[in-house]
Image (cartoon, rainbow, N blue to C red):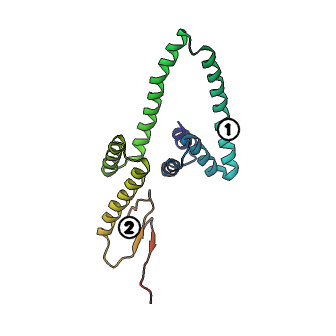
Amino acid sequence: MLRQEVISRRNWLSEQQFLDLLGATNLIPGPNSTEMVMHVGRERAGWRGLIVAGSLFILPAALIVLVLACAYVGYGSRPQAEWLLYGIKPVIIAIVGQALWGLARTAVRSRLLAALTIATLALFLLGVNEFLLLFGTGILFAGIRNVGQASSRSPTSSLVFCPAGSYPSQSPLSRCHSRRFSSPS
């Protein structure tokens, strides 16, 4: 929902900016949705935007949870309320599934990314550590991409550093930062 609001509806961020913020959010411990809203607030209005976005995201949610908790304590053990709690689970699964599908359609732009995504998901389901998967997949993708780019350059060209998300269109140096490394003289 945040992706649709920030990218499609309000046009505050590009797809790539959103994915970059999402990647940073996944590396930071804590509630991802809150962190993502705070990142977007900071991108839009600096530290003031971060505080306003965080406050206006956290306070209503906290009040809603408080009301629901009070209702659960008072009515949760009654048989009439069991059907409601039972019906919430499929709705939550559908919302999460829809969000993942939209994100996958945006983030997985090639067969290589699709293969890495499937492999990473399989390893996660087998119990491999999340941080190891995030860093390992990122390093593997960057290595594969840079090897492909290096084979198209001449041996005398400079080494090129391409940050994640920058995809050169015409030449390897068109959107990347060139870094020449020389031996000390």
Marks 2 and 1: which is nearer the front?
Answer: 1
What x and y, as percent, mark residue 109? 37, 49
The residue lying toward the viewer, choosing from 53 and 121, is: 121
List x then y, in percent, for residue 29. 54, 47
Q: CA distance from mark 2 to mark 1?
A: 43 Å
Q: For the point 38% across and 64% down, which residue is it?
A: 170
Q: First in sequence, mark 2 or 1: give its number.
A: 1
Q: Nearer the viewer, residue 156 or 7?
A: 156
Q: Nearer the viewer, residue 181 or 74?
A: 74
Q: Residue at x 48, y 18 (%)?
A: 87
Whether residue 149 sits left or right of residue 106 in the image: it is: left
- Judged from the image, the secondary structure of the residue bearing numbered disc 1 is helix
| Amino acid at the residue labelled 1 | Leu
In the picture, measured across the screen, residue 131 lies left or right of residue 45, that is left
Q: Identify which amino acid the numbered label 2 is placed on.
A: Pro
Q: Is residue 94 above or below residue 140?
A: above
**In the rendering, which numbered label is found on residue 56?**
1
Q: Between 96 and 79, which is closer to the camera in this rendering?
A: 79
Instruction: Report crowding for label 2: few under 14, some 14 to 19, many 20 or more residues within 10 A (C-alpha).
Output: some
- Other-residue count near label 1 (Cα within 10 Å), few / some / many at <14 / 14–19 / ≥20: few
Q: Is residue 132 above or below residue 57?
A: below
| Circle 2 residue | 172
Residue 52 position in % (x across, y down): 69, 43
Q: Is residue 166 left or right of residue 140?
A: right
User: Which residue: 31% across, 52% down?
Assistant: 112
